[in-house]
């Protein structure tokens, strides 16, 4: 990676660039990859535009609800995945069957990990 400035580029190098919270939020909210954040009990705390569009729900219809409302046939699998996450494992390509607002079934591969709090819990 070259630190040389390109013609017409900003005078800041990558190391100098400090992103603020709103830039990070915007980046993840508009990501083309469906993303969500769950609580330890499976409540959807946040979802980005791509996930909402993929499943056809508004933020109000999705955020604050249990993830199992949208993949009701996956309760046992979800418990198994949560158990693996709690034990520190990172999950890759876990298949889940989600139901869209219109009733269409979407087969999704989920990657997941846990962001731990300093006290050893996650929310």
Image: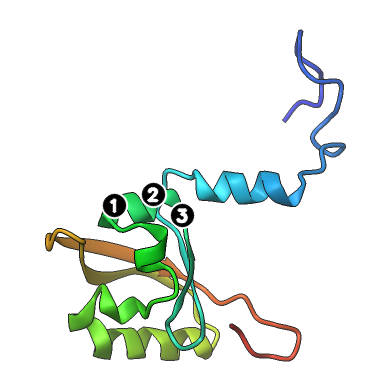
Helix, strand or loop at disc 2?
A: helix
x%, y% of residue 65? 38, 77
Asked if residue 112 is positioned above or below residue 75 in the image, the reply reads above
State the quadrant of the C terminus: bottom right
Mark 1 in CB contact with mark 3 (< 8 angstroms): no
Q: Residues within 10 Å of mark 2 (few under 14, many from 20)?
A: some
The reply to whether callout 1 and callout 2 are in contact (CB within 8 Å) is yes
Mark 3 burial class by Cα count in 10 Å: few <14, some 14-19, many 20+:
many
Answer left or right for 54 relative to 20.
left
Q: Farthest front residue?
A: 60
Q: Mark 1 = which residue? A: 54
Label ID, residue 50: 2
Mark 1 vs mark 3, CA separation in Å: 10 Å
Residue 18 pos. (x, y %): 82, 43
Q: Is residue 31 above or below residue 96?
A: above
Specify whether 11 is left or right of 65: right
**Element under disc 1:** helix
Q: Secondary structure at mark 3?
A: loop
Say which residue label 3 marks.
48
Image quadrant containing the N terminus: top right
User: Within the image, what quadrant is residue 36 found in?
Assistant: bottom left
Image coordinates of residue 20 in percent, x first then y, are 77, 47
Q: How is the image coloured?
A: rainbow
Indicate the position of residue 63 as horizontal and vertical percent values.
43, 68
Given residues 81 and 65, the one toward you in this image is 65
Q: Earlier in the sequence, mark 1 or mark 3?
A: 3
In this rendering, would 101 be left or right of 57?
left
How far apart are the two marked residues, 2 and 3, measured between alpha carbons? 6 Å
Asked whether the residues under the numbered discs 2 and 3 touch, taking CB atoms below 8 Å apart as contact, a structural biologist would say yes
- Residue at left offset 64%, top offset 90%: 121
Q: Residue furthest top?
A: 7
| Residue occupying the point 12% across, 60% down | 104
């Amino acid at each position: 990676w070259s630190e040389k400035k390109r013609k017409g580029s900003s005078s800041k190098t990558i190391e100098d660039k400090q992103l603020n919270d709103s830039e990070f939020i915007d980046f993840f909210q508009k990501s083309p990859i469906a993303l969500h954040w769950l609580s330890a009990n499976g409540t959807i705390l946040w979802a980005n535009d791509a996930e909402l569009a993929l499943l056809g729900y508004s933020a109000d219809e999705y955020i604050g609800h249990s993830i199992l409302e949208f993949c009701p046939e996956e309760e046992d699998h979800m418990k198994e995945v949560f158990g693996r996450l709690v034990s520190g494992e990172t999950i890759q390509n876990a298949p889940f069957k989600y139901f869209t607002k219109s009733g269409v079934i979407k087969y999704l591969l989920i990657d997941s990990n846990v962001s731990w709090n300093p006290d050893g819990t996650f929310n």
